[in-house]
Amino acid sequence: MTAPISLNAGGSLYDRIGPDALAALVRAFYARVAQDPLLTPIFPDDLTLTAEKQLAFLTGFLGGPPLYHERYGHPRLRARHLPFEITPQRGRAWLACMQGALRDTPQIQADDARELFAALSRVAVHMVNAQDHPAS
């Protein structure tokens, strides 16, 4: 899950998006996460470090410098997320926040946004570690 997205004629997805647009995406994403009632219970109140880690992870995941590896070690995404109840519903909420953040980041071209969203959709499915709770 941590291998960079493949190169194409325009370079890596990181090269095409660029660090500034990626940082803007992460800011827009966590602004949405902070307002999502399904996600706030599994995130800290202060999202600063979480956003820094996400930016470092995405940088390497998209083919840029391996910042997450250098700062925190191997991402071990599934293992690091096991303490949190990630249901299919929360996975969909996470993806909805990312889709909204991509729309709110016009510096990211539509084709690149689609490629990134597709890759993150696979990651979101991989992170699910619990079942949805039946409606009360």
Image: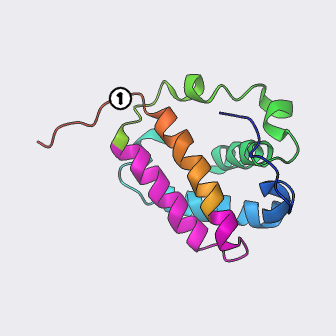
Residue 43's spot in the image, x, y percent? Answer: 50, 43
- Decide whether the magenta segment is chiefly helix, strand or loop: helix
Vertical relation: 89 (above or below) 102: above
41, 3: nearer the viewer: 3
On screen, residue 2 versus residue 35, left or right, reads right
Vertical relation: 98 (above or below) 87: below
Q: What residue occupies the far left of the structure in this picture?
A: 136
Residue 92 magenta-highlighted = yes
Residue 115's spot in the image, x, y percent? Answer: 64, 58
Vertical relation: 90 (above or below) 133: below
Residue at horizontal 77 percent and vertical 46 percent from the top: 6
40, 107: nearer the viewer: 107
On screen, residue 87 versus residue 72, left or right, reads left
On screen, residue 64 versus residue 32, left or right, reads right
How crowded pointer 1 is (Cα within 10 Å; few <14, some 14-19, many 20+) is rated as some
Residue 135's spot in the image, x, y percent? Answer: 14, 43
Residue at horizontal 87 percent and vertical 57 percent from the top: 11
Residue 95's spot in the image, x, y percent? Answer: 48, 54
Find the magenta span and give its range. 89-113
Q: What residue occupies the far bottom of the structure in this picture?
A: 106
Which corner quadrant of the image does residue 86 belong to? top left
Q: Tell me the quarter of the image containing the N terminus.
A: top right
Give the residue at mark 1.
130
Callout 1: helix, strand or loop?
A: loop
